[in-house]
Image (spheres, rainbow, N blue to C red):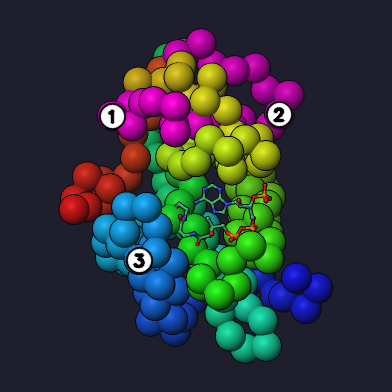
Amino acid sequence: MRDDIVCPALAEHADAIDAIIRAAFVDTEFGYQGEAELVRALDADGDALVSIIMCREQEILGHLLFSRMNVEADGRTLSAAALGPVSVLPKFQGQGIGTGLIRIGIMILEEKGIDISFVLGHEAYYPRFGYSPDLAARFASPFAGPHFMAMMLDSAAPWPLGGRADYAPAFGRMG
Ligand SMILES: CC(C)(COP(=O)(O)OP(=O)(O)OC[C@H]1O[C@@H](n2cnc3c(N)ncnc32)[C@H](O)[C@@H]1OP(=O)(O)O)[C@@H](O)C(=O)NCCC(=O)NCCS
């Protein structure tokens, strides 16, 4: 991690990012489900909010995307970001790269003044960053369930009582 560099993903990185996403997801429980195309579609739609890469000695080892969401709570619109996909090349997994990308991505969201972030993922992994299934359960969503988690970016902000959370349109075209 010491010599790793995190930087914004640029157009010139697109092919390398595609390859990382495919390699990372092919080995997962559900297999590759078009996550690379999803990232390209979110970018083309202008819904990519934070797209960052982790590099070590010129090689890109991981990628993380936060995309724009449409979220309303307690009668007002919240600025919101969905975490994922996050991908690390299989042979470099378990070295803290995913954790580093997520922590830096969350700091960027805080700097941007984003109110809330959601993630659909493993309940053993994302709570360490502050994501909570109890907060997400207050929002109506097609993804509602134990894997759906949320976090207020300002940890002192009160939790909304209820609302709805919609992912960017590209998620609906997956599949
Ligand atoms: C998930 C992923 C991004 C994590 O990155 P990483 O660099 O391997 O993870 P780190 O080294 O930072 O963290 C390791 C921790 O993550 C946990 N972890 C890794 N993948 C996990 C998964 N799919 N589900 C639950 N926990 C996971 C490990 O068990 C380990 O936990 P520990 O700290 O309690 O031992 C990476 O493993 C990956 O690309 N996986 C395939 C794609 C994927 O499933 N992405 C997530 C859904 S969008």
| Helix, strand or loop status at disc 3 | helix
Q: Which of labels 2 and 3 is toward the front?
A: 3
Q: Are marks 2 and 1 in contact (CB under 8 Å)?
A: no
Q: Please tell me the numbered disc located at residue 155.
A: 2
| Helix, strand or loop status at disc 1 | loop
| Residue in the image at 58% along x and 38% along y | 124
Dot 1 amino acid type: Pro
Q: Nearer the viewer, residue 99 or 90?
A: 90
Quarter that holds the N terminus? bottom right
Dot 2 amino acid type: Ser
Q: Residue 152: x and y, percent?
A: 61, 30
Tell me where residue 128 sits by quadrant: top right
| Residue in the image at 49% along x and 58% along y | 86
Q: Are marks 3 and 1 in contact (CB under 8 Å)?
A: no
Q: Which residue is mark 1?
A: 142
Q: Please tell me the numbered disc located at residue 162.
A: none
Estimate how packed mark 3 is, as few (under 14), some (14 to 19) or many (20 or more) residues with alpha carbons within 10 Å: few
